[in-house]
């Protein structure tokens, strides 16, 4: 499986789907679908932050092993394979946090710098938080 697409999928399930299926309007319009989704995840459990962190670690490992640039990965490229899965600033920031947590400080700085660049266009992350995170990563 592609770790970039897997990361995006688990992110969407963790942060979007769980909220969407619990809204009354969704339940009213898609009641049986909502119940089936809920039943599935009650049986097999909702994705956790540990699941997302494990996928971020795989992306970091691919970056290290194949000596890839973060912008290549964020644009969906793994070496010469285009995945059609891109990363937004919030995803890049999440990967930064895992890199910092696992003491991969060079990668952490690259990911938070990328998150700042992407945030300028996608407006999904705070520049202040990203700038502070970059400063904090450099200080370590």
Image: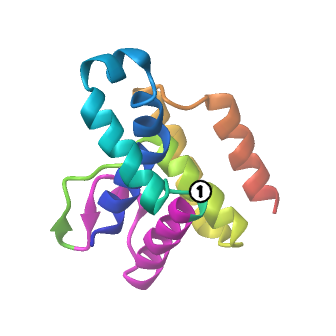
Q: Nearer the viewer, residue 39 or 104?
A: 39
Instruction: Name the magenta segment's main secondary structure.
Output: helix
Above or below 13: residue 35: above
- Going 40% across and 38% down the picture, which residue do you hit? 17
Left or right of residue 5: residue 50: right
Residue 49: x and y in percent read 59, 56
Q: Nearer the viewer, residue 45 or 120?
A: 45
Q: Is residue 15 visible?
A: yes
Residue 101 image-quadrant placement: bottom right
- Going 75% across and 47% down the picture, which residue do you hit? 135
- Going 65% across and 72% down the picture, which residue do you hit? 104
Picture quarter with the C terminus: bottom right
Residue 138: x and y in percent read 74, 57
Residue 79 image-quadrant placement: bottom left
Left or right of residue 132: residue 89: left
**Of helix, strand and loop, which one carries label 1?**
helix
Above or below 111: residue 121: above
Residue 35 image-quadrant placement: top left
The number of callouts visible is: 1
Q: Which residues are magenta?
A: 51-79
Q: Nearer the viewer, residue 116 or 124?
A: 124
- Going 33% across and 34% down the picture, which residue do you hit? 34
Picture quarter with the N terminus: bottom left
Query: Outermost residue, bottom direction?
Result: 65
**Is residue 32 on the magenta stretch?**
no
Above or below 125: residue 78: below
How is colour applied across the structure in the image?
Answer: rainbow
The residue that disc 1 covers is 49
């Amino acid at each position: 499986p592609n770790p970039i697409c897997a990361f995006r999928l688990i992110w969407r399930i963790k942060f979007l789907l769980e909220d969407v299926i619990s809204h009354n309007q969704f339940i009213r319009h898609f009641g049986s679908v909502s119940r089936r989704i809920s039943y599935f995840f009650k049986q097999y459990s909702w994705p956790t932050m540990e699941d997302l962190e494990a996928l971020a670690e795989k992306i970091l490992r691919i970056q290290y092993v194949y000596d890839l640039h973060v912008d290549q990965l964020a644009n969906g490229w793994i070496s010469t394979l285009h995945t059609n899965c891109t990363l937004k600033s919030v995803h890049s920031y999440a990967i930064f946090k895992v890199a910092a947590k696992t003491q991969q400080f060079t990668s952490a700085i690259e990911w938070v710098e990328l998150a700042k660049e992407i945030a300028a266009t996608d407006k999904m992350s705070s520049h202040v938080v990203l700038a502070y995170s970059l400063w904090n990563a450099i200080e370590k």
